[in-house]
Amino acid sequence: MRVEILMPELGESVHEGTVSRWLKNIGDTVKEDEPVVEIMTDKVNTELQAPAAGVLTEITIAEGATVKVFEAMGYIETDGAAATSPKAESKPAEVTPTPATPYAPTSVATPSNVDDKKWYTPVVRAMAKEHGISEGQLAAIAGSGDGGRVTKKDIEAYLGSGGAKPVATPKAAPEVKPITPTVAGPDQEIIPLVGMRKMIADHMIKSSQIPTVSTVTEVDVTNMVNFRDHNKESFLETYGVKLTYTPFFIKALTESLQAFPGVNSALQADGNILRNNAVHIGIAVALGAKGEGGLIVPVIRDCHKKTLVEIAKDLDAIAKKARSNSLKPEDVQGGTFTLTNPGTYGALFGTPMINAPQAGILGTYSIKKMPVVINDMIAIRSIMHLVLTYDHRIIDGMAAGAFLASVRDKLQGFDFFK
């Protein structure tokens, strides 16, 4: 039997992805649940597992090509080769449909009420493909599973009633060719915009449609810098993670979002404002040695319930998962506000782009020792800039300024570690 390798839903707003790498070649034996293909979206990179044991006989979506949700990327032939998988051995034998009692569905969906986005399991999809069952016929079968889900037994009963059609001859698989740069002129090359870069580009276009304003403030973080300098070694020894500045930024940001819940909001497509009572902070993480691997925004959840130490541990864990390409879809979903920290690579100032549909993003920039005037005397202090970009449709300038001042005062006062 031929089983489809389908592109799953990797998030509510994810409708397509890019095949970044096939982990198996045509003709290779695969085990059930073994990773076979790597998928890239604007939210996450993930490995998809084989839906069944067998032999990879066909690849329909080449590396670098776009694949839509529920579209078949390849096929696994389970006959014969399935015996190589321990999981396959425990499966019951396939039931050969026989024309017994005619199958009569309890409810039939007409073409006018068929849901185009109805979901079916990979096994059901594979059986429908094998026996030539159309999408309309599939939608007309009343499922006996949870919530009316169509099961393998429902398909077998349908086939037993004589509902099968002749199987169409499968189309030849497209030739899998690697995407290579083409020379445009002397000392130039053209590189296709594919994969994560294309996903980021599409998301940035969507974010650019939001009317935004950026507000800047200067922060004296001398107390924070001194605390970290004096405690970073003992912190690592006690808690097992390095003490960076980012957990302090997250903690101050979280407390300010709780004090200004309007900033922790999003404007929905229906025109209503979604206000978040919980604080889930997305952290922009650059991938690759020079950041050329793209940018991903994993989420630290429930920051409002966590201490600075807990935030530091979560930050360390999520950054390692991002850089090792082991994030799961749930790791990048549900963020209510985003923090980006270009200061880690020395940037002094910038205007970060909002992460739609969130209402704001905070940029934290490089800390520099500078001469400042305190009580009419010059002192050397550690100074940095905070930049808030916000959705001006739902956040006014006064509210944004008060929120940014709250973050500034918390960092300058440095009393939230206790």
Image (spheres, helix red, strand yellow):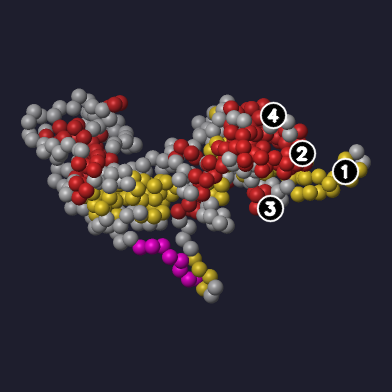
Query: How far apart are labels 4 and 1 at the CA level?
Result: 29 Å
Rendered location of residue 219, percent (x, y) = 76, 41
Front: mark 1 or 2: 2
Element under disc 4: loop
Q: Which amino acid lies under the numbered mark 4 shown in the image of this protein? A: Lys
The residue under the point 70% across, 35% down is 407
Tell me which corner region of the image, top left, top right, bottom left or bottom right, holds residue 280: top right
Query: How far apart are labels 3 and 2 at the CA level?
Result: 20 Å
Query: How far apart are labels 3 and 1 at the CA level?
Result: 24 Å
Tell me the residue that label 2 is attached to: 223
Element under disc 1: strand
Element under disc 2: helix
Judged left or right of residue 396, residue 78 is: left
Q: Which amino acid lies under the numbered mark 3 shown in the image of this protein? A: Gly
Query: Is tag 1's residue or tag 2's residue first in the polypeptide sequence?
Result: 2
The residue segment tinted magenta is 177-184
Query: How far apart are labels 3 and 4 at the CA level?
Result: 29 Å
Query: Is tag 3's residue or tag 4's residue first in the polypeptide sequence?
Result: 3
Judged left or right of residue 91, residue 328 is: right
Tell me the residue that label 3 is attached to: 346
